[in-house]
Amino acid sequence: MEKLRESQIKNSLLLLLASVVWGLAFVAQSVAGSNIGTFTFNGIRFIIGGICLLPFLRGHNVRPSKIPPNKLIGGVICGLALFLASTFQQAGIALGATAGQAGFLTACYIVLVPILGLFIGRKCSFLVWPAVAIALVGLYLLCDPLAGVGFSISTADLALLCCALLFSIQILCVDHYAPRMSPVALACVQFFVSGAVSLIAAIFFDLMPDPSAWINSLLEPTSWIAILYTGIFSSAVGYTLQAVGQRGLNPALASLIMSLESVFSSLFGWLILHQTMTGKEITGCLLIFSAVILAQIPTKKGSVN
């Protein structure tokens, strides 16, 4: 029991480190969003992330060609989920969402994870339902820029909410497949799958409409700073920490720790990009974060391990 407890603490700290890495990644993504196409950015960074992990496969006695098909399919499924989630996330940032807004709207996956878990037989705390209500109020305050003129959700907000739903699916996929294969192999496969699909999409949506603009976007030094950070740290380091840290942890607890990326994204956005929020938006963020915490409080019938 003591070893299990120590293992859970270690894995929790790994997920906390991942949340710091991802929080800073929102700053890099904000910089890239104004310079480079969504599919091009995600494609290159995920391929870089996969390449960075290749040397570590040998340390886990794994070769790409030796991964059994029944395990490879898990990486493919996780990779497709990652592709969809990251596409909507980067699109929302490119459409004008600040690093803090993107972080907190993405964090809504924390409330969605236990709800979606019901469909695969996982218990859900009854506190999730009031958490959903609080989160909806927070979303209203965060997404509606016109106080007193009714609810108005922007395209960027809608993209980030879709991202939250898709990331909740990706988290459950990782939770399902992580115990069945090497976490490094799982991360590596999902990066190459997500990167390859993104680059294929980039040909049609980023390159073909305006080849000269596409080439110029790749000549921007700031674009490559963002690509290299998100490729090496956010992708290779962050998602590997997720794959390792989620082993042996309840996905609801794991998602709670990872949701702290929203706090770090807002902090780094303020420190580095000098982005600010209105009092109404800050209140919305606080309500969403409160909902995230409430949804993870242990109860007798739906405890968080």
Image: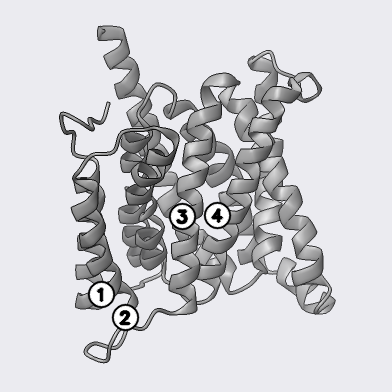
Q: Which mark is residue 144?
A: 2
What is the spatial separation of the Cα atoms under label 4 and label 2, in whole angstroms? 23 Å
Q: Nearer the viewer, mark 2 or mark 3?
A: 3
Q: Quadrant of the N terminus?
A: top left
Dots 1, 2 in contact, CB < 8 A: yes
Q: Which mark is residue 85?
A: 4
What is the spatial separation of the Cα atoms under label 2 and label 3, in whole angstroms? 20 Å
Q: Amino acid at mark 4?
A: Ala
- The residue under label 1 is 141
Q: Nearer the viewer, residue 297 or 127?
A: 127
- The residue under label 3 is 165
Q: State left or right for residue 2 relative to residue 165.
A: left
What is the spatial separation of the Cα atoms under label 1 and label 2, in whole angstroms? 6 Å
Q: From the top left corner, tell me how far across and down residue 69 is, in percent.
A: 75, 24
Badge 2 element: loop
Instruction: Give me the residue at 41% from left, 45% from top.
Output: 116
Q: Earlier in the sequence, mark 1 or mark 3?
A: 1
Q: Amino acid at mark 2?
A: Asp
Instruction: Give me the residue at 38% from left, 44% from top.
Output: 113
Q: Is residue 17 above or below residue 58?
A: below
Q: Nearer the viewer, residue 130 or 167?
A: 130
Q: From the top left corner, tell me how far across and down residue 201 is, in percent.
A: 76, 62
Q: Quadrant of the C terminus?
A: top left
Q: Nearer the viewer, mark 4 or mark 3?
A: 3
